[in-house]
Image (spheres, rainbow, N blue to C red):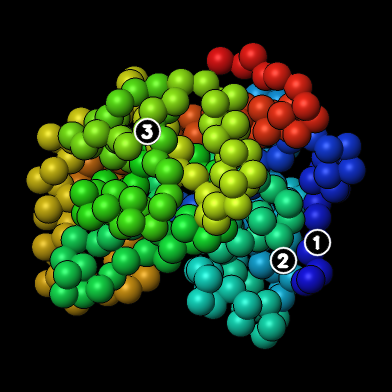
Amino acid sequence: MIDITFSPEVADARSNGAPLVALESTIITHGMPWPQNVSTARAVESAVRAHGATPATIAVLNGKLHVGLTDPELDALGQAKDVAKLSRADFAACLATGGTGATTVAATMIAAHLAGIEVFATGGIGGVHRGAETSFDISADLAELAQTPVTVVAAGAKAILDLPKTLEVLETSGVPVIAYGQDAFPAFWSRDSGLAAPLRMDRPEEIARAARMRAAMGLPGGQLVANPIPEADEIAADTLAPVIAAALAEAERQGIAAKAVTPFLLDHIFHATGGASLTANIALVENNARLAARIAKAVVTLARGGENTDG
């Protein structure tokens, strides 16, 4: 087993059997500029605490896996340059070579599982990129959901992706896709992608029970909880469609590929929407953190043999 550095707050929660919620770090290093990146990270952590769980922001710092970051570590990561964007393929190499890296959904799931954390809140997962039938560009997040037993709370998959194909891959991989509180599969900035979600659950306790049942059955992998952005913060899918189309066309014109695609598209959409996409992004991440905390509490309650009535 690799050596993990736990923050004092996370170490205390672990020793007391308190609920924990994993948080990724690419939103800090690759998603927003300083100092908004760190202020957003702290707001997300505060949302987890306010709903009864302990946040565990995950990153690799100088070759050490950190589960939970102290304030100085978070500040330093938010201002660091040339931070690697880690997924399953390069996570171990970064640790082995003493590097510093921020964790994507896939890498955060791996680290959370190593640390015994069952619930993870993020913005949106990666998926099948448009044109994947020729590029074969499919996020490692989907394969990770199929094999690593972590419940991932996200506002669906990023709207820049091919959502029908993303749902198809998840189904083929045996990943439960659970819409929270509605029948439609959300599309990141928008509440409704126009696609039906395979499953619907309305209570955190139901989601926790489903995870427990999968473990009891010996089924591999996690669950995707698709939590729609609050109505007051959403950008309608019809409004975003031409913006996303223009961003995709520009990425193709410039030959943007691989890991550079998503950051490029998100930056293009940010400028095209006058910053509205980033405002919505922050709102949905905080919303996901709140739900993840409630699910983590339900997981702990079930593990102790009790019933959770948090609706």
Query: As displayed, is residue 253 above or below residue 241?
Result: below
What's the residue at 88%, 37% (across, down)? 16
- Comparing 218 with 194, the one in front is 218
Asked if residue 252 shows in the view, the reply is: yes
Q: How many marks?
A: 3
Please tell me whether mark 2 sits on a helix, a strand or a loop: strand
Q: CA distance from mark 3 to mark 1?
A: 37 Å
The quadrant in which the C terminus is found is top right
Which amino acid does the dot numbered 3 rest on?
Leu
Give the residue at mark 2.
Answer: 65
In the rendered structure, the answer to whether residue 23 lies left or right of residue 158 reads: right
The residue positioned 25% from the left and 62% from the top of the image is: 129
Residue found at x 16% / y 75%: 134
Which of disc 2 and disc 1 is earlier in sequence? Answer: 1
Mark 2 and mark 3 in contact (Cβ < 8 Å)?
Answer: no
Mark 1 highlights which residue? 5
* Residue under label 3: 199
Badge 2 crowding class, 10 Å Cα cut-off, few under 14, some 14 to 19, many 20 or more, is many
Label 3 vs label 2: CA separation? 34 Å
Whether label 1 touches label 2, CB < 8 Å: yes
Q: Amino acid at mark 1?
A: Thr
Tell which residue pokes out farthest to the front in this image.
217
Q: Residue furthest bottom?
A: 97
The x, y position of residue 279, in whole percent, is 38, 36
Amino acid on which the number 2 mark rests in the picture: Leu
Q: Position of residue 253 (x, y in %)?
A: 12, 72
Please report the residue visible at 62 percent of the width from the left and 16 percent of the height from the top.
310
For disc 1, the neighbor class at 10 Å (few under 14, some 14 to 19, many from 20) is: some
